Image: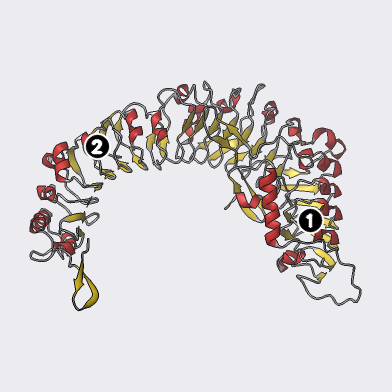
């Protein structure tokens, strides 16, 4: 604190000088210094610690400006060595911050005079941070230390021979960070841990606790923990069990037998090995099982899909599975969503998947699947999202063109992505696209996003997918139910672009780039009045750019580059918003975005139908998006990766 002294010479003010370090605190610090073994590290650490000087200016020491008492002692990570912690430390009774981490106390006993409950409170009544990790201490810590009202951080990590137990926590504590991992703490973790309402980080890994992790820990809304070790077996009944974003390394034997009442189980983004995957097989009422982004390896056990009469969503993305996916689905399969993306799965898609008649989402992107386009899945009339990109699919999309209406129709599909495969032949003909009814007529009862409600919970489980959208790899953390996308890019398709695509009035993105398509750009595409992204680049398209494209006001991303297009580029205010790169590599084009036209005949320009500015277009999109609940403008709700 600073007091203001008035001056008789004028209105100038002067801050009071800081109070010098108390002699008693200086003496305690010098005794503590002498307890460390003299070494090059200690000489550097204590170079400024000289008797007779103000200890408040010593390196690692901070004092209160008001009374000169030492409030902070930071000797962490100095490479110091000692035969024991000197009791002089406990004379610094005004400490608020104490850090001795990563110094070596040679397995010495913690002084009981300092760490017994009542003495600790008397010695350090204002302490908020206690960091003693990796100190090689030995002994026990009185459990009621954890009741200290002002302690925000307690870090004892890595002291293998420090023992103790957690108390029955009461409300009113300030703990935000508690790490007793790699210690000899033991006993059980009581349900009262949920009283630590401010807790953000809890480290218990590699300790000696027994029993189960209480489900009440799920009530800690601020927790950003990193649990380690084995998956804790839940106590009691739990509808939702989320072990995501931790460091769990193993699964207890017969773990699934303890999940009889769990509806949603997530254990994503841990480090679980593949040999424990069978622990999640059978005998549960789990509806939503999320095992994504772990370290699962090897093959997927067939038992995981043999009896899925209850399971509605299975998420295995982002692991290291190899081999073929088990072809063991049976009648009665209740799966609605299956995500296999980001693995190394080989062979064919399992034909028994047709037993899952309620399937709405199949994401098998980024694997090593060698198969033809799955026309056989047309019997799954509820299928909405089919993402097969970055595999080794080959052949035509509808191989038997004469029968495509009967055997290759996907009336509910809103997202079809087969980009980056080896598909060849001509694109499906008009009837195939006309059968995409959900890209033509919107269901007025569709939800805003694709997901699943969780009983007795205020939250819902949202389905995700990752596709290329407007030229960027985009992860939709929540798939908008009204999003309509066709992506056939980076294949070997030939022939012309079917005119029937122009009838898909709900389409938001059409990507046919990096193929060998020929012929003109169909003028019917101007009927796609909700289209935001059109990519026809790197083909062999010829003819002129249809003047009608200039009236597609919602189109924000256009790429016609590297084709064989000729003639004058449509001249309209909206078309001028695209970059020159959108038509690059078409030597026969001229006009806006390209070289000047030299012919004297000027075609009739497209009608100027009140083309809005970018800002006005965005206002329209936001209005439709929020007012109607569907439509355009999805780019405002995605994460670009």
Q: Report the residue at 13% width, 65% height from top.
A: 54
- The x, y position of residue 449, in whole percent, is 63, 40
Could you say which is closer to the camera, residue 617 or residue 329?
A: 617
Gap in angstroms between the C-alphas marked 2 and 1: 71 Å
Task: Estimate how packed mark 2 is, as few (under 14), some (14 to 19) or many (20 or more) residues with alpha carbons within 10 Å.
Answer: many
> Which label is found at residue 147?
2
Could you say which is closer to the camera, residue 565 or residue 296?
A: 565
Indicate whether 72 appears above or below 262.
below
Question: Split into 4 quadrants, where in the image is the N terminus?
Answer: bottom left
Give left or right: position of 360 versus 104. right
Indicate whether 189 appears above or below 228.
above
Q: Which residue is mark 1?
A: 516
Q: How is the image coloured?
A: secondary structure
Which is closer to the viewer, label 2 or label 1?
2
Q: Residue furthest right?
A: 601
In the structure shown, which secondary structural element does the residue marked by tag 1 occupy?
Answer: strand
- The answer, for residue 419, to whether it is visible in the render is no
Give left or right: position of 20 versus 290. left
Indicate whether 313 appears above or below 100.
above
Could you say which is closer to the camera, residue 345 or residue 310?
A: 310
- The x, y position of residue 114, in whole percent, is 13, 42
In the structure shown, which secondary structural element does the residue marked by tag 2 occupy?
Answer: helix
Q: Earlier in the sequence, mark 2 or mark 1?
A: 2
Name which quarter of the figure residue 349 lies in: top right
Circles 2, 1 touching at the beta carbon (< 8 Å) = no
Task: Estimate how packed mark 1 is, as few (under 14), some (14 to 19) or many (20 or more) residues with alpha carbons within 10 Å.
Answer: many
């Amino acid at each position: 604190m600073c007091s203001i002294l008035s001056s008789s010479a004028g209105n100038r003010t002067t801050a009071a000088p800081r109070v010098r370090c108390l002699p008693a605190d200086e003496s305690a610090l010098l005794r503590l210094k002498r307890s460390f073994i003299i070494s090059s590290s200690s000489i550097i650490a204590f170079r400024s610690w000289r008797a007779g000087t103000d200890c408040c200016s010593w390196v690692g020491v901070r004092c209160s400006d008001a009374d000169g008492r030492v409030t902070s002692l930071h000797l962490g990570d100095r490479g110091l060595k000692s035969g024991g912690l000197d009791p002089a430390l406990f004379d610094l009774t005004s400490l608020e911050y104490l850090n001795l981490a990563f110094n070596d106390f040679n397995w010495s006993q913690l002084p009981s005079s300092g760490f017994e409950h009542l003495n600790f409170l008397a010695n350090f009544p204002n302490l908020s941070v206690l960091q003693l990790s990796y100190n090689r201490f030995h002994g026990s810590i009185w459990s009621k230390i954890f009741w200290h009202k002002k302690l925000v951080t307690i870090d004892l990590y890595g002291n293998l021979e420090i023992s103790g137990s957690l108390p029955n926590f009461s409300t009113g504590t300030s703990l935000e960070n508690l790490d007793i991992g790699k210690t000899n703490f033991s006993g059980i973790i009581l349900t009262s841990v949920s009283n630590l309402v401010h807790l953000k980080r809890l480290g218990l890994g590699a300790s000696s606790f027994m029993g189960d992790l209480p489900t009440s820990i799920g009530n800690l809304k601020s927790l950003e923990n990193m649990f380690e070790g084995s998956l804790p077996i839940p106590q009691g009944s739990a509808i939702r069990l989320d072990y995501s974003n931790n460091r769990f390394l193993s699964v207890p034997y017969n773990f699934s037998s303890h999940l009889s009442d769990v509806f949603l189980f997530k254990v994503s983004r841990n480090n679980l090995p593949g040999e424990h995957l069978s622990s999640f097989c059978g005998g549960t009422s789990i509806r939503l099982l999320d095992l994504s982004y772990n370290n699962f390896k090897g093959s997927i056990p067939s038992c995981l899909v043999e009896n899925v009469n209850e399971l509605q969503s299975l998420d295995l993305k982002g692991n290291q599975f190899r081999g073929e996916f088990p072809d063991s689905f049976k009648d009665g399969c209740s799966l609605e969503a299956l995500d296999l993306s980001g693995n190394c799965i080989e062979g064919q898609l399992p034909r028994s998947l047709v037993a899952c008649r309620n399937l709405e989402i199949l994401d098998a992107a980024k694997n090593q699947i060698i198969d033809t386009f799955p026309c056989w899945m047309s019997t799954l009339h509820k299928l909405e999202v089919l993402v097969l990109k970055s595999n080794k699919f080959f052949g035509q999309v509808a191989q038997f063109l004469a029968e495509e209406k009967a055997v290759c129709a996907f009336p509910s599909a809103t997202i079809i992505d087969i980009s980056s495969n080896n598909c060849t032949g001509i694109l499906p003909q008009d009837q195939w696209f006309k059968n995409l009814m959900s890209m033509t007529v919107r269901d007025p009862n569709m939800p805003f996003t694709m997901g699943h409600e969780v009983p007795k919970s205020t939250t819902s489980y949202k389905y995700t997918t990752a596709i290329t959208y407007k030229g960027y790899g985009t992860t939709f953390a929540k798939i908008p139910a009204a999003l309509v996308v066709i992506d056939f890019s980076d294949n070997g398709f030939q022939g012309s672009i079917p005119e029937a695509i122009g009838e898909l009035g709900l389409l938001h993105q059409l990507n046919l780039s990096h193929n060998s398509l020929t012929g003109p750009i169909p003028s019917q595409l101007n009927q796609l009045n909700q289209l935001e992204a059109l990519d026809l680049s790197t083909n062999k398209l010829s003819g002129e750019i249809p003047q009608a494209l200039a009236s597609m006001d919602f189109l924000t991303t256009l790429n016609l580059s590297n084709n064989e297009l000729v003639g004058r580029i449509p001249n309209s205010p909206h078309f001028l918003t695209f970059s020159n790169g959108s038509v690059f590599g078409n030597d026969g084009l001229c006009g806006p975005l390209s070289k000047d036209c030299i012919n004297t005949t000027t075609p009739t320009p497209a009608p100027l139908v009140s083309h809005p500015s970018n800002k006005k277009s965005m206002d329209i999109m936001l209005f439709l998006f929020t007012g109607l609940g569907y439509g355009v403008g999805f780019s405002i709700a995605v994460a670009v990766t």
